[in-house]
Amino acid sequence: MKNLTLLLILFLGFSACKQVEKKAVHIEKEYYGTTKEGKEVDRYTLSNDSGMKVHIITFGGIITHLYVPNATGGLNDVVLGCDSLSDYEKGSPYFGALIGRYGNRIADGTFTLDDQTYSLVQNDGKNHLHGGTKGFDKVVWDASSRIENGKAVLQLNYLSKDMEEGYPGNLNTEVTYTLSKANILEVSYRATTDKKTVLNLTQHAYFNLSGTADILNHELKLNAPHYLPVDETLIPTGEIASVAGTPFDFTSFKAIGRDIKKEDIQLERGLGYDHCWVLDDSNKGLRSAAILQEVNSGIQLEVFTDQPAIQFYSGNFLDGTNPMKQSDSFYNYRSGLCLETQHFPNSPNQASFPSTELSPGEVYSTKTQFKFTLIN
């Protein structure tokens, strides 16, 4: 009888543990809106029992809200965004969106593959930016969700057809958002093509860990001893320059506002920081690329990636025209920052830069993790 009782207790204890494990992460789906073209958009909520919660819509794969625990036991929504689908359609500055086919800029909107020149949309002066006028940030993705290995998983798929926005090849793209119990949001990318093309995918969340007016008091560390100087149109010159002795040195923690107003031709061209940093250990796979922290909220964000570079953008073009979500105010100058893991800008036109070419039979595969903790 005692043995039977012991077995029953063990069984019930095991079952309870399994129930706790099952409830550690959650996924909810709801209708979000309908686009001007008549396509329905859903919103998925991935959450865990630690309080972290992320809202993602199928329009642009956009992260609209990202709630993480702060030092006082509450939650901070740490990303900029809009209140409605119509606001996103009107044209936000890529708030929280998936970027493709090519994140960042391509000079003059042209590149050559196998002696054939391709012309892209010029939507940033004479240059091509973030995939064109209707990049991956403005399409409706197919979606499915599941709980897998104790994680909440949202899988998004999109077929970008041959010559869409000027890019060759039918490109099958899969982006998977995964939220773990450890407050890590992972974004993994996978793509194949039936024609040689170029590809550089990224995520364009604007972070503000404090919820205050700007990000100048945030402290940033980048594991990058070099960066890419740019010309007047923010196209890399081809030089890979040392950050030592420059305002671009973030090899140890530094307040973003400390050097941002210094006299420097690169800061003048970007109106602040809008440059690509070359990461250490590019051949070692997933590793720490950046750490961002904000003392008042106590929140720390660490970015891990297997990509060779990260674009740090200090929100220099936010101009007070985009309404702040859940507020009567507007997003002003430097009210958010971006840490976009990626390949180098304009790589298709720079032979010395790492290649971004993708051929039939190859698989594009990369991942980035955003890990949220409290400052020690």
Image (tube, rainbow, N blue to C red):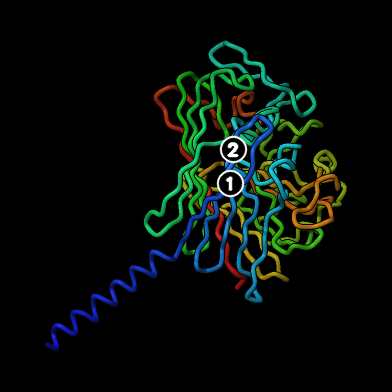
Q: Nearer the viewer, residue 165 or 87?
A: 87
For image coordinates 54% across by 18% down, the residue present is 162
Q: Nearer the viewer, residue 167 or 7?
A: 7
In the picture as drawn, the residue positioned furthest to the bottom comes out as 2
- Tell which circle, 2 or 1, labels the residue nearer the N-terminal end: 1
**In this view, 256 is above or below 33:** below
Quadrant where the C terminus lies? bottom right
Q: Where does the image place residue 338, in percent across and percent down from the top left?
A: 69, 48
Q: Is residue 288 left or right of residue 255?
A: left
Q: Which residue is mark 1?
A: 31
Could you tell me the amino acid type at mark 1? Tyr
Q: Where does the image place residue 267, in percent across and percent down from the top left?
A: 82, 44
For image coordinates 57% across by 54% down, the residue present is 303
Q: Nearer the viewer, residue 144 or 77?
A: 144
In the picture as drawn, the residue positioned furthest to the top comes out as 115
Q: Dot 1: what SS?
A: strand
Could you tell me the amino acid type at mark 2? Glu
**In this view, 62 is above or below 210:** above
Q: Is residue 235 left or right of residue 11?
A: right
For disc 2, the neighbor class at 10 Å (few under 14, some 14 to 19, many from 20) is some
Q: Where does the image place residue 269, in percent across and percent down from the top left?
A: 82, 38
**In this view, 27 is above or below 31:** below
CB under 8 Å between callouts 2 and 1? yes
Number of numbered markers: 2
**In this view, 97 is above or below 216:** above
In space, the residues marked 2 and 1 are separated at their CA atoms by 8 Å
